[in-house]
Every structure is written in C-alpha cells, then in structure tokens.
Image (cartoon, rainbow, N blue to C red):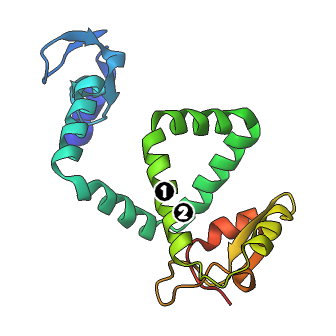
Amino acid sequence: MVRTAINLVRLQTPLRAVKTCAECGVVKSVDKFHLHPNCCQGVEPMCKLCRRKKAKTWSASNPGKQAEYAARYRDRHPEYKERENARRRALTEENPGRYSEVSKARYYKNKAEYFARNVIRRGIVKQQTPRWADMKAIAAFYAACPPGYHVDHVIPLRGKTVNGLHVLENLQYLPAHENMRKHNRLTD
C-alpha cells in the first residue's frame, strides 16, 4: 500500500529536466539516464555513459561471467536463437551489401589473424595429405565445384574422434549452408 502511494506521488510530481549523475557528478538532461520506475524521478541515479563504463569494467574483471549469463539465458529461452536468427536474416535481406562491407572491414582490420589461420589450415591439409594422393585429381575436383557448393571432407581433417585424409575419396560437394553448419563433425 505504501509503495503504491509513493509511486503515485512520483507520477503526479512533475519531472525535472536535469539530474546529477551519482557516479561522475555532472548535471545532465534526464534523457541521458535509463528509465527505472522505482528510482527518484523515474530514472536511474547513474547516467547511461557511466553505466556503460561500469558494465565494461565489470566485464573486464569477470571475463567468463557474461558468457555464462548469456548461455544460461539461451538455455532458459529456447526461442531466443530462432528470434535472433530471424532478426539477422531480416537485416541481411534489408541491407544485402552491408554484410560484405562488414566482412571486408573485419578482414582488413584483422589481416594477420586471417593469414595465421590460413597458414595453420594449409599445414593441416599438408599434414593429412599422404604421398600417394593424386593432387591433379584433387585440384580438378576443386575446380569443378558447382556455384553455391563447397568442397567438404567427408571425414574431417581434424575430427574429435577420427582424422580424415586429404584424398579424392574423402571429398564431396556440399551446399554451402550445410557445410558451414557441419563444421568439423563427422555426419552420417
């Protein structure tokens, strides 16, 4: 009863246009604060900028916690993944060139990482290629790959239970989306 009366009083009193941030002490416009119905003036005591800084500091000092919270949320809300995938699909359909622009920017920003990953990949392929493998036939197989398909190793080169060889008999054409979904797994 008392809590409801306090909230009623808050709703009836006019909001001031400015508020002092409890963290940085700067007087800012009320729209620079997150809304919170149980706080004074209906906004949080800390401004959005200070809240963001505090969240970043917390994430840096607790590196695994954020991922743990996110995983727990996804476990409790199975519809989240479908909703998130639908949102991403809609974004890529609305902005078809945006994905490639972001990918290019990420590539140029992290070129060394991409090169290192490719060097590791080439080393794995080389290590898993026996001397008796017909490299000309493998090259022809890669060259004949139809558009929209990837060349996939039936038995992955770095599987969890078994490692496949980089030979013609272990290669197959797989639609790109299926190959990306398969990752390093051995499927039936």
The answer to which of 171 and 2 lies nearer the viewer is 171
Of 89 and 83, nearer the camera is: 89
Quarter of the image with the N terminus in it: top left
Q: Could you tell me which secondary element the residue under label 2 belongs to?
A: helix
Q: Residues within 10 Å of mark 2 (few under 14, many from 20)?
A: few
Give the residue drawn at x 60%, y 35%: 104
Q: At which x and y percent is residue 164? A: 58, 85
- The reply, left or right, for residue 82 in relation to residue 52 is right
Seen from the viewer's position, the closer of residues 176 and 118 is 118
| Residue 76 horizontal/vertical position (percent) | 43, 69
Which amino acid, by three-letter code, is at mark 2?
Arg
What's the residue at 38%, 64% (across, down)? 71
Pointers 2 and 1 in contact (CB under 8 A)? yes
Q: Residue at x 62, y 55 (%)?
A: 85
Residue 33 x %, y %? 30, 23
* Residue under pointer 2: 122
Q: Quadrant of residue 22?
A: top left
Q: Is residue 166 above or below residue 73?
A: below
The residue pinned by badge 1 equals: 119
